[in-house]
Image (tube, rainbow, N blue to C red):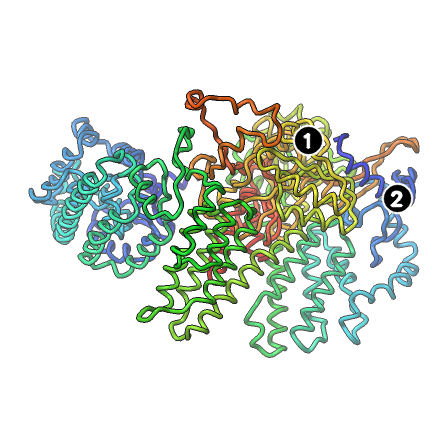
Amino acid sequence: MDARRVTSAVPRVRQVGFFTPNAPPQQPGPTRSQSGPPISNSPPLSGSPASNSLSPVMIPPPRHLSDNLGRRTAAVPVPGRENAGYHGTVGSYNPSESVLGLESPPPSRIGDGEFSEGTESSLGWCRRSNSAKFASSFPGGGFDLSPAKQPESVAGVEAKNQLPEKSELQKEQASSSKPLKAKTTKAERRALQESQRAAKAASKAEANKSGTPGGAASSKPVKQPPQKKDGPPVAASIAASERIGVDHPAEKERKKDVPPPRMQFDDESRVGKAKKRSVLNQPETRNRVELFRHLPPHKDGTQLPHLESKFFELHDKHPAVYKVGLQYLTGDLSGGNARCIAMLQAFQQAIRDYSTPPQKTLIRDLTSKIGGFVSFLIECRPLSMSMGNAIRFLKNRVTKLPLTLSESEAKAALCSDIDRFINEKIVLADQVIVRHAATKIRDGDVLMTYGSSCVVEMILLYAHELGKQFRVVVVDSRPMLEGQKLLRRLVAKGLSCTYTQINAISYIMHEVTRVFLGASSILSNGTVYSRVGTASVAMVAYAFHVPVLICCEAYKFHERVQLDSICFNELGDPDAIAKVPGSVDVSYLDSLTDKQKENLELLNLKYDATPSDYISMIVTDYGMIPPTSVPVIVREYRKEYLLI
Amino acid sequence: MWRRSASFILDRQQEQNDGGPPNPESLFLSSPPPPMADSLQNPKSNISAYYQNRAAQHPVVTSDWLAQAQAAVSRNPDDDDSSGGDVRVAPTGGGKGGEKAFSVIGEFNSWRKQPDLAEAVAAIRALAAVIRASQATTMMELEIEIKKASDSLKSWDTTSISLTAGCDLFVRYVTRTSALEYEDFNSAKSRLIERAEKFGEISCKARRIIAMLSQDFIFDGCTILVHGFSRVVLEVLMTAAQNKKLFRVFCTEGRPDRTGLRLSNELAKLDVPVKLIIDSAVAYTMDEVDMVFVGADGVVESGGIINMMGTYQIALVAHSMNKPVYVAAESYKFARLYPLDQKDIGPALRPIDFGVPIPSKVEVETSARDYTPPQYLTLLFTDLGVLTPSVVSDELIQLYL
């Protein structure tokens, strides 16, 4: 290793981060005389699919900039004066670069120093800019990063140091800089245009959103206006560039992949807008916990009459969808699978009764119609991630419908697709999971479960049918007390059960040998997003060295990553935790006056995130996998599952 | 864990299956194990065939019971043949129609005799021979035949993980070709044989690749702790010695089959400084150790390994002292298993010699291997590259799904 390192010139121009692995190997050492070729190389490079995969977001943070600088200064012993120049302002670098014979024209410094510097000096320097705006204005951002540039720039620095002796080299540089200049001026113009446009857009957005806090407006672009504004400049710059043909679809694809920003309920202007559109009364946001203000407030069943009275106004909502929405609202329908199946079946019903209005195409109209249904359902209760996956599947099916199909054929195809999804991804998947998980139950086991998961219930019943001798500990918690429902069904089937509240979990964990838990969804870092309390159960089990098995269908896997249970969650009815129904002796909070209640914030979260460290195994329809393999499943099967 | 009732029940069941309390005599080495090493139906003895295989392959291990066992086998080959002869064709003959003379197990065992051939590779070779000897006329028939043969191989020794994994992998590798369906049967068959042979070759080369990959991790002046006799680890150390690396090796004794003695023997031949330590001195010497190198019987889906008894505790000690634990394992040892704890793997039992008679009331733990969870392993050297434990599942998913 050491020997290799000494002989090659790699370290000087070593690729760090952000390089595509299949970029051609750079020429070592004597690139000085070859400073021309790399330039001519760069356009094909940027057009190559490899550089397409570089996302503009991947422009390195400033840390890399300093790395880069450090390496360059270290590699070439430069006098202190110049050294200071490197670390000084960006502009101060330009004169020294012009010594190279690059003949940097004065107009190049019209824009702000960052852009002119980035475009004029060797293209590798574009890495300096860490403004996302600039980055995204170059859709083919990859070309800046092509490693072939670096030797040239290093050579440039060296050339400058040895100027007196190497005048012929300078000539060479000058001649090679001609094409470079032509290219850069174009890039400059584009950059300039871009910056102006961006500035304009930003100022407009600022004006629009004067009421909102600046941070929110700039960091999370509000859905419609800025995106529309973003569109044209990107398109223009694309048109201006000759290497966009390849980039354009990729860019589009990427945009589609980026999830739309979630509604933040602490953003007053948006909430106000949403209120106007809403069919439900938004409950008053009184005394909500500061950290959780961004979550949609809980809507309880008391709005049912209100919604029912609106039945005839909402004629664009199909009755089946309407019914499901009401069931969500009242809480009659709970459990991830049940909710998802009900929603899909309602959509199926709606598709069956659907007829394309005149002068519209089925694909467009149906997609928007489904979108309307979905937003109605979201109003009734926030969707779970698994339902999001199901909706994405359905919409994908609709858009992929061949245009040649007649309306009835298309409808039949969609209905059978929905049936297949329910069948393959939920019903059959459950059977496979049950089969797998049952192999992990041995005679004499004590199994613990928390809350009520239908897959876990099926596993327990199946193992019982197989004649395995085991005991079940059902752990439960207020306010849902879902465990009691599960307990009732298990006891009826003749399983021996223990029932306890989550407070007693550290006591009961001694005798437990396996913990089986369900999940609402599993994120790609292995985090399990599930009923609140799951995380504490898993952590206690981990502390006792009891294996924790998560049983979850693969359609609930989501490529999102979440580290805590704050940024995405669901709020329950705050009164549910304050009041204990039916028992008078513990209703301490009832006697509070309104004045006292002002100081009281009630937080009833519905879900929490369990870090993957506490999970021993995930049982899914693709077998038993460790939590580290969730992204593999997502990567390998998402395509298949979107296309089925 | 004494609280866990499961293990007690499991133990009790096992006792019952074995027919009452374990006969203490059978646990002594003085009594030879039943001479079944070559018969087809692996006996439900309390010594796993897997360990008999290993013992048979490592004759350096000087244990008299082995010698006796082998003597017993050779003494009455007639009975063995006559008893095994008709059984032998039973599982494989079904799919084969007329062919009765050929047996996978026999083929497997003949391959297994080669000292340098791993069990899984022997199984792969045997399966290739099945294809060659097959008289099937359609692809489907052939496929069924291969599956049957691999099933009978697997059932011959259910305790060996690498055998099972190797069979599964081979079946997967051979049958997972869409191109086969479009060719006529004979060329498809020859293609299959070609593939099978190639697979066998790849498996043979795996050890060499691993040795090359691991060289970057062995630095001059390091101390390596090894446990058990693993041919891959030996190859790694041999290559390092050939590359003129300066290192020393601590060998655990590897009770009861004394595999460490054998390894130290081999290393001493290479002039590598070796120190033998008893199995219980691992924690004592861990201070001086720079890295731990172990082989594996099987690599499971979680990324953990199943290996000779004692690996787990060495990994625990190394983990608590922040020493890296490296595993050298060929990719045909990747198995679709997911043990949650030690009792979750089928026990591979073996006799243990305590030197003195054990009172009949005293139980003896005779399991021969343990499961090391992935969090205690640093890296896996495989022929697919140097992997972190979590990549194993990735590879398995891509292979099997």
Mark 1 residue type? Met
Residue contact between numbered discs 2 and 1, judged by CB atoms under 8 Å? no
Image coordinates for residue B7, horizontal then vertical, percent: 78, 37
| Left or right placement of residue B46 versus residue A397 in this view | right
Quadrant housing residue A107: top left
Question: Which of B47 and A558 lies nearest the eye of the viewer?
Answer: A558
Residue topped by disc 2: B16
What residue sits 54% from the left and 43% below the top?
A: A628
| Image: A326 above or below B84 | above
Image coordinates for residue B248, horizontal then vertical, percent: 61, 32
| Image: B6 above or below A365 | above
What residue sits 54% from the left and 41% below the top?
A: A530
| Left or right placement of residue A458 versus residue B183 in this view | right
Chain of the residue that carries numbered disc 1 in the rendered image: A
What residue sits 62% from the left and 42% below the top?
A: A452
Residue topped by disc 1: A509
| Image: B40 above or below A402 | above
Q: Which mark is residue A546?
A: none
Residue B269, can we see it? Answer: no
